[in-house]
Amino acid sequence: MYKINQEKCCFLTQFFVDFELGRYKDHEIRYNTEGKILNHKEEISKRELPKVVYNSIKRNFNSYYLDDLHRITDSEKVIYTIELNSLIQQDWDLITDSNGNILSKTAN
């Protein structure tokens, strides 16, 4: 299933398409008015995380389990968003770059 939406923001028009490939593989792609891809957000599994990203998360958040993982690609970089959940500690929303550097950590 796919859905096409149009957003108007800051005098620019963007289009985005939401679709699903396979089971639980959600994608969202944003386009500008010329049809150029601005970014691509895709749901990924833990196995699809680069080893350096996974190792960085496990080194810093060993007692957490990973949930709701996404890879976001634009023309210049790739980032990963991950929910870190724990039964006894604060949950976190984490953003890392493709080298495993933590760019953002927000309490969930």
Image (cartoon, rainbow, N blue to C red):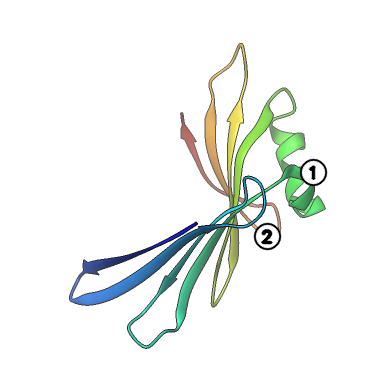
Viewed as shown, does residue 81 lie left or right of 15?
Answer: right
Extreme-left residue of the structure: 11
The crowding category of the residue bearing disc 1, from other C-alpha atoms within 10 Å (few below 14, some 14 to 19, many at least 20), is some
**Nearest the eye: 37 or 57:** 37
Counting from the top left corner in percent of width and height, residue 63 is at: 72, 22
Determine which residue is flagged by label 1.
55
Counting from the top left corner in percent of width and height, residue 108 is at: 46, 28
Viewed as shown, does residue 43 lie left or right of 39?
Answer: right
Extreme-bottom residue of the structure: 34
Amino acid of disc 2: Ser
Q: In this rendering, is residue 9 above or below 23?
A: below
Give the residue displayed 62% in from the left and 20% down from the top. 86
Find numbered disc 2 in the image and state the secondary structure of the residue it sits on.
Answer: loop
Give the residue displayed 76% in from the left and 36% down from the top. 59
Give the residue displayed 36% in from the left and 79% down from the top. 32
Q: In this rendering, is residue 38 above or below 20?
A: below
Amino acid of disc 1: Asn
**Nearest the eye: 72 or 24:** 24
Point out the tag, 2 or 1, that comes first from the N-terminus: 1
Q: In this rendering, is residue 82 above or below 19?
A: above
Determine which residue is flagged by label 2.
98
